[in-house]
């Protein structure tokens, strides 16, 4: 464990547990830490790792979303930070919340915080470091496994949110996912396509009268079916009533 510099003054600490990525960004005025691990012990080790990189003031802790593995270290790290920043829909105690976009001035560089829409959660945000062409994507992008569709996900909206993320990327961008190895624009494009197929398949099955409990077995999916239980439940629940059909009655 420890930070690796992946671009000019942008470091990633890839944690042993869950392959979680913590990102540290430095500017002339100080540091910004993105996510804080899932425990106090990990956060204390993270704090030491940060201080091995720099003694500069911690201007902000930014939480990509409100899942425990990204925010439970806040208690340790927020104490040192001037601000804790999250999206307004994230259930995280924060001193700064925003709805669509916010700039963060760290001195000689400007960071962009963007809520591209709902997907992995209601309160996802991504952080762009424009001068380094790096985007920290949180769990909107997943490398270590299939995208994590949980009971608080928005399967029908996720793909269009990734379109906004894609609009922030160049061919040469480095994207840091919430978990796993760094990826590029092509990877995000492919994952967006697969996430779009999940949404279209849900719409199609519901439109043909396939009930939610039968949906996983009734189609082929771009991800393993056992990773899509919540996707189907949440997708069906989000469909407008008019798009749900009753199963056709058999003729006699
Ligand atoms: Zn998550």
Image (spheres, rainbow, N blue to C red):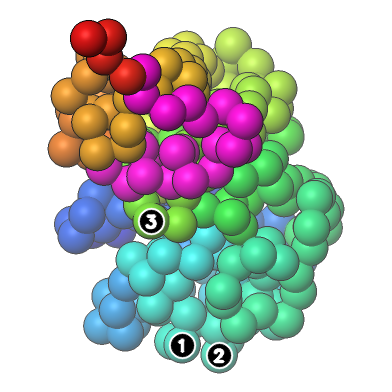
Viewer-side residue, 110 vs 8 = 110
Question: Does 4 appear above or below 82?
Answer: above
Quarter of the image where one finds residue 29: bottom right
Q: Is mark 2 within 8 Å of ligand 1?
A: no
Residue 144 image point, x, y percent: 25, 37
Residue 165, position in %: x, y?
63, 30
Of the two numbered discs 3 and 2 on the same chain, state the one appearing first in sequence: 2
**Label for residue 79?**
2
Give the residue number, with chain letter if any, for mark 1. 75
Tell me the quadrant of the picture where the N terminus can be found.
bottom left
Q: Are marks 1 and 3 in contact (CB under 8 Å)?
A: no
* Residue 27 percent across, percent down from the top left: 70, 56
What segment is highlighted magenta in the picture?
A: 229-248
- Which one is in front in this view, the residue at disc 1 or the one at disc 3? 3
**Cα distance in 3D space between marks 2 and 1:** 7 Å
Q: Nearer the viewer, mark 2 or mark 1?
A: 1
- The residue tagged 3 is 151
């Amino acid at each position: 464990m420890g930070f690796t510099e992946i671009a000019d003054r942008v470091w990633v600490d890839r944690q042993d547990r869950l392959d979680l990525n913590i990102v540290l960004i430095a500017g002339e005025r100080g540091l910004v830490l993105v996510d804080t691990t899932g425990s106090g012990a990990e956060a204390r080790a993270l704090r030491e790792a940060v201080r091995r990189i720099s003694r500069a003031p911690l201007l902000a802790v930014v939480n990509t979303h409100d899942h425990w593995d990204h925010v439970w270290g806040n208690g340790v790290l927020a104490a040192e930070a001037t601000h804790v920043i999250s999206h307004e829909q994230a259930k995280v105690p924060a001193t700064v919340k925003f709805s669509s976009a916010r700039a963060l001035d760290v001195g000689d560089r400007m960071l962009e915080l963007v809520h591209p829409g709902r997907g992995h959660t209601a309160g996802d945000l991504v952080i762009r470091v424009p001068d380094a062409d790096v985007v920290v994507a949180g769990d909107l992008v997943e490398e270590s496994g299939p995208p994590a569709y949980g009971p608080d996900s928005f399967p029908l909206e996720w793909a269009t949110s990734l379109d906004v993320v894609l609009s922030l990327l160049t061919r040469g961008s480095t994207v840091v996912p919430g978990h796993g190895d760094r990826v590029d624009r092509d990877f995000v494009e492919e994952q967006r396509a697969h996430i779009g197929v999940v949404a279209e398949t849900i719409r199609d099955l519901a439109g043909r009268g396939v009930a939610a409990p039968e949906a996983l077995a009734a189609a082929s999916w771009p991800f393993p079916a056992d990773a899509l239980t919540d996707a189907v439940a949440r997708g069906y629940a989000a469909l407008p009533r008019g798009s749900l059909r009753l199963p056709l009655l058999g003729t006699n």
